[in-house]
Amino acid sequence: RCSSLSKSRHPHNWKGLAEALTCHQQILLNYFGEALSEPCNNCDLCNDPPETFDGTQVAQKALSCVYRVEQGFGMKYVVDVLRGLSHERITSRGHEHLSTWGVGSEYSEQEWMSFIRQLIHRGYLIQDLANYAVLKLTAKARELLTGDTTVKLAKPRKIERVGKKKKKKRKAAAIIADLSEHDQALFAVLRDLRTELAQNQGVPPYMVFGDKTLKQMALEKPDSESQFLDLNGVGDNKLKKYGAIFLEAVAEYQAPPAP
């Protein structure tokens, strides 16, 4: 991992180009501090663009929630607040009383994750990887929060698989039966992440990682690229494509609750 790159702007911190729903060339140029006002019309996303919608209100909800939790939590926690969850981490901080608690209950966790990552791609949010990947507003976010600008977001792509969900759940349950409750919960987080990546790429989940690799990941909890590369089913290509994405998810799950 190149130490000269700002961790908050590292391209892998955006879940990489693997699941980007905006022009890849615009994302790359934004990373290098340059701007491309219009899509390049040449990358795979431009050639097969996702359906878009006016995401201004969705973006305002997300940015406002990040602000109201004092820019001190990661993506999963912010999404839980937006969706109105009432688990102990939220109630112990009184965050169920925030004005943004439950304002996004109409969207699934996967949809909110995609929306927030798009806001990261667009430069409205950053993730501070040096501080448990907490979300922080950028100066650009003010334009959206005050209504001075609007933004279009892409609808996450989905793969419909009918009649196979129960069988897959039984198979997954058998694979992780010997894991601790804590590790099974992490496995579920990693599996959801894999599903989202696969949906956005239009590929079956096993082409990202198989269940056995996710199980080993949940059990061993790698915290470096070298440890990630030691996992079964991980080679140089998958390390480059998915390594930082899953390492971030493991680190966020392992992170202690903020005081």
Image (cartoon, grey):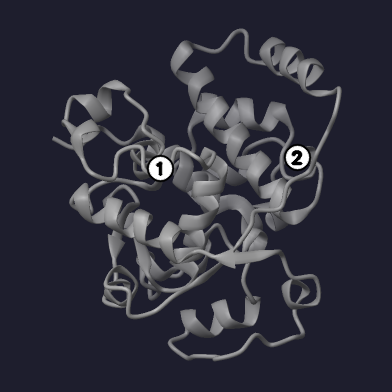
* Total marks in image: 2
Depth check, mark 2 against mark 1: the one in front is: 1
Instruction: Kindly identify which residue carries mark 2.
Output: 205
Q: For mark 2, does the 10 Å Cα neighbourhood hold few (<14), some (14 to 19), or many (20 or more) residues?
A: many
Mark 1 is on which residue type? Val
Pick out the residue farthest to the left: 259
Q: Vertical placement of 217 versus 127: above or below?
A: above
Q: Vertical placement of 182 versus 253: above or below?
A: above
Mark 2 is on which residue type? Pro
The quadrant in which residue 217 appears is top right
- Measure the C-alpha gap from mark 2 to mark 1: 23 Å
The quadrant in which residue 257 appears is top left
Lateral position of residue 166 relative to residue 29, left or right: right
Instruction: Kindly identify which residue carries mark 1.
Output: 79
Residue name at image x 28 percent, y 65 percent: 137
Quadrant in which the C terminus appears:
top left
Residue name at image x 61 percent, y 46 percent: 229
Lateral position of residue 174 relative to residue 253, left or right: right
Dot 2 or dot 1: first in sequence order is 1
Residue 195 x %, y %? 67, 40
Residue 47 x %, y %? 80, 76
Residue nearest the viewer, comparing 58 with 47: 58
Pick out the residue farthest to the right: 163
Find numbered disc 2 in the image and state the secondary structure of the residue it sits on.
Answer: helix
Q: Are marks 2 and 1 in contact (CB under 8 Å)?
A: no
Q: For mark 1, does the 10 Å Cα neighbourhood hold few (<14), some (14 to 19), or many (20 or more) residues?
A: many
Residue 114 x %, y %? 55, 53
Residue name at image x 37 percent, y 54 percent: 62
Residue 14 x %, y %? 50, 61
Residue nearest the viewer, comparing 243 with 85: 85
Q: Is residue 223 visible?
A: yes
